[in-house]
Amino acid sequence: MNKSVSAQKAISSITDHQQIMIGGFGVPGTPFTLIDALLEQNSRHLTLVKNEANIAGLGVSKLIENGNADCLITSHLGLNRVVLDLMNHGKIQVEFNPQGILAERIRCGGAGLMGFVSDIGIDTILAEDKQVIIMGDQKGILEKALRANVALIHASTGDLFGNLCYEKSARNFNPAMATAADIVIAEVEELVAVGEMSPDQIHTPGAFVDYVVKIDELTHEYDILEDYILG
Amino acid sequence: MDRKDKIAKRAEQEISTGQVVNLGIGIPTLILKYLSRKKEVVFHSENGIIGMGSHCNRSEADRNLIDAGGGYVRLEAGASFCDSVLSFALIRGGRLDLSFLGALEISQRGDLANWIIPGKYAPGIGGGMELAQKSKRLIITTFHNQKNGDSKIVPECSLPLTAKACVDRIITELAVIDMIDGQLQLKEVSESSSIDDVIAKTEAPLLVNESEIKQF
């Protein structure tokens, strides 16, 4: 089995108006190569699902700055003043979720569940537009599962079947998103033959993955951000 | 020592060996600077690190290893990585012994507001609500007053809440204040302040038992 294709071929699965999940938390785990291919293809009116919007000029922020997305489902934009300004000027619609609720909604979507009930945010404005469920003497918010048409994933190692292994804090949202889309595209830093990865080291089984893209070159976007050296 | 460092140094005393602890962005991160080497503590980071170390320099930095604020970090022995789902299962499942967060406002009942000023500042929630609601103990490290001098500790929060009745202790540059039986009680006063000064700068009512108040 060989799921290896070019970034352009894999990204051609995406059409206008689709919902796209993008892995990563900051630079680690963000699929910059796939994002660049999507930018090149210039699909429009996308709804993006990502933990944050990277920082201005980098990764998913480039898609938003270029006007490819109408909506962003996210957790926090505190490190991206440009996207916050676009939000404040009505250029992009943003839905904020508590970070773990975002992760769990994606997990549910990937697990074939319709949603879950949680007390997070129950006494806050986040509960205002949501269905509140009474369970005995407890109140909870009905959180709906989240799925996407396509998920873009970054892994350190993958094989031709699509088995994936993530590195350090680059795991973050990638494993959950890799279960929650109709088409799952994974970019990998190292591509190996089937059988070379130890079954115990595989974080995402290849059965969840449709396309594997070998990253040609780790561009500057994957590098360390000098402004965040704080020690 | 500036105000932030003073708060962080006092906050360090709240941490004890064996605890699983989360440090929010800002002053809480500074606590690591003062952490006693004798304490064996496991720091959790929302992006999937259990056993995180302090911020590192350029030569140690790993492009795949950051904390939830984006800073490059070291790892402690015994550290592990997990995905965001498991990272928040740890938080919501009640496995965090202690969290430190900042505040915009704290009410006299221990309500916390720290994520949005409608129309001015709305960067999103991040992990704050889950940390505030589900940590076994929540300590707020913050300046005592707003930039304009208004008290951050108020009878009723005017800003949208992060979580209701979640605060256990407040540490500012002036005072240590506890939530006890639904009321705020002054416990410690900074050496550069006084009981009268703290009361004057705090809008919410404080229970004060003068004979029991310590200095820090």
Image (cartoon, rainbow, N blue to C red):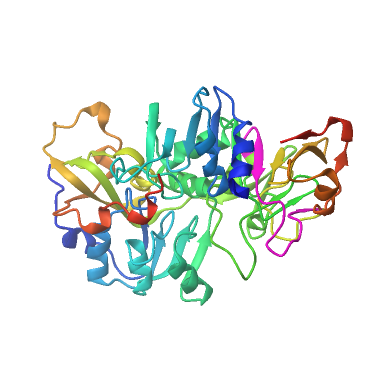
| Residue B70 in the image, given as x and y percentages of width and height | 41, 50
**Picture coordinates of residue B56 (x, y %)?**
37, 41
- Residue A136 counted in the magenta span: no
Visible in this render: residue A118? no
Q: Looking at the image, which residue is at 27% across and 72% down?
A: A42
Question: Which corner quadrant holds the C terminus of chain B?
Answer: top right
Q: Is residue B129 above or below residue B80?
A: below
Q: In which quadrant of the rendered view does residue B95 lie?
A: top right
Q: Give the camera-side residue of A28 and B212.
A: B212
Q: Give whichever of A176, A65 is nearer the camera.
A: A65
- Is B162 in front, or is B102? B102
Residue at x 43% of width, y 57% of height: A52
The secondary structure that dominates the magenta segment is loop
Q: Is residue A160 left or right of residue B52?
A: left
Which quadrant does the N terminus of chain B fall into?
top right
Residue at screen point 45% across, 59% down: A79
Report whether residue A47 is seen: yes
Q: Is residue B201 left or right of residue B130?
A: right
Residue B175, horizontal then vertical, whole percent: 74, 43
Q: Quadrant of residue B82?
A: top left
| The magenta segment | B134-154
The reply to whether the magenta stretch includes residue B143 is: yes
